[in-house]
Amino acid sequence: MPAANAHIRLRETANLSTGGTATDVTDDVHPDIAAMCVRAAAAVGLDIAGIDFVSPNIRQGDIGAIIEINAGPGLRMHHYPSAGKARDVGAAIIEMLFPDDANGRIPVVAVTGTNGKTTVTRMIEHIVRGTGQTVGLACTDGVWIDGRQIVKGDSAGPNSARLLLADRSVDVAIVEAARGGIVRRGLGYDWSDVGVVTNVHEDHIGQDGIRSVKDLVRIKALVAARVRVGGTLVLNADNEAAVGMLKMAALRRIAKRIAFFSLDANSLRVRRHLRKGDAAYVVRDGFIYEALGMTSQTPLVALAEIPATLGGLAQFNVANALAATAAARALSVSIEQVAEGLRTFERASANRGRANLYRVNGGYVMVDYGHNAQAYEAIGNFASQLQGFRKTGVVDMPGDRADEVIEQGARAVGRVFDRVIVHQPRNARGRQPGDVARLICSEIRRSSPGCDCVMDDDEATAVEAALRDMGPGEFTVLFYERFDCVMHALERHGAVRVHGVVPGSIGMPERPPSRAAQVEHDCWDTA
């Protein structure tokens, strides 16, 4: 038997799991000890921590020591102590994480569509970042946080959306939702605050079981359906497929605001929309206007001040600017900040590979990622306003499209250009080498006999052939597959970045040029 008053050590530790007891002494802790524990947790970067402090007298502030800082402390002992007062530390942690009933969410903007979605996401990001917020952007070319690229390559999918939402530094997330990601893995978020549908056209027919535009509408309508209650859905009023989404039951179940954008301020659809008191963003007298109902019409910015519109001639980027404006205004960005964002969205590195214009040997070269009939027609509408130019296109199309989709694109190309150089895509996507190029050229020759169509085996040599012929009176569009291939060729030919062409003449840049082919390419790679 142990002697009276003898101390016998039963265990080396006094953890609850090994038979120890927990007595709450919160009210007895000396303020200096409490402050020391707070400093210790902050020193190792923890906002929630368990501190093991050993002291013969917890009421005295000048004795004792910290022996452990635990990043995953247990809570049960505080809620159910062996002795002393129970403390609701779980509630305190939740209140710290979500003060004033905050839900921990950040604004999410999702953009989908056939054409224009990458440019629209970039425009929105640029506008919102101008407000001083930290913006996360995920699009076809990568992931950016606060203007710094953290992931390269196609990131228009759910994994990239989750990456942004997991980053605590991000105040607003702007995500591009492409067809492939939606079909294979969903959206990557539950609800958005703003959803944008730029347009839906015949593309990707023959992929992932898609047989018609209706199939594409059903896929892209998921972005529209997942706009939260009270959020804003932005739709292209000039596109029947986009507006048709409003008839879907999944969209009608959730109350949301609808904002239209349109190149036609007098369209019957827009006027009916405004009569209901809703918002629309339209072009009138060379300005972007915000219309709220039938009575409020506010000019935001002149098209001539938006470099991306190339003096207002590039109608596809006018539409993109309208969509970005509607989304930014739905996020409560001021009119002045939206206008400034559109004015400063001009460098090739801000929207690389999307209607970037260069001067080469007295002629003009446009670099664009268009790969379907509607994209070719949009560029063609711009080119048709340039009188006195011979128009050349360097094109290919993805081989996994149905023959009729490729032929539709070929017919659009034949209508737009005087000369077409067709190169075989690097990845034929299931077709035999040369099949896609032959199909395109065959359809161009059949539908547009006056168009000179030649074939080339490789994108690099096709681009080089087009640039060798550049001179005054030449307007060439490089619909690229490999952006770096095109940029290196432009660099070799001394390309200069410009922001417009004077219609009806050879034209001069609207502002002093820079050697952008090399400089902006380098800036992009190191961003």
Image (cartoon, rainbow, N blue to C red):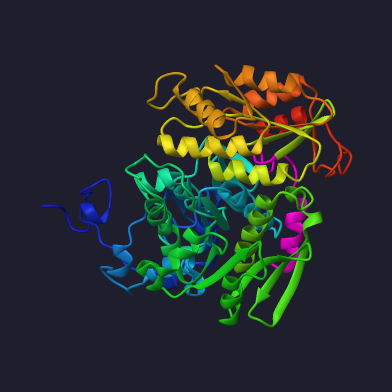
Q: Is residue 148 left or right of residue 46?
A: right
In the depicted structure, whether residue 422 falls above or below residue 54 = above
Q: Is residue 3 left or right of residue 157?
A: left
- Residue 335, magenta (yes or no): yes
Give residue 114's position: percent from left, percent from top: 51, 48
Decide if residue 527 is in sight here: no
Decide if residue 512 is in sight here: yes
Quarter the C terminus occupies: top right
Q: Residue at x 66, y 61 (%)?
A: 263
> Which sits in the foreground, 407 or 344?
407
Question: Residue 89 occupies which quadrant of the picture?
Answer: bottom left
Q: Residue at x 37, y 73 (%)?
A: 253
Give residue 511's position: percent from left, percent from top: 88, 43
In the depicted structure, whether residue 11 falls above or below residue 482 = below
- Residue 314, magenta (yes or no): no
Q: Which residues are magenta?
A: 333-355
As drawn, the residue found furthest toward the left would be 1
Q: Is residue 34 left or right of residue 465?
A: left
Counting labels gives 0
Give residue 473's position: percent from left, percent from top: 82, 31
> Which sits in the foreground, 126 or 273?
273
Q: Residue at x 78, y 42 (%)?
A: 386
Q: Residue at x 32, y 73 (%)?
A: 86
Give residue 88's position: percent from left, percent from top: 36, 72
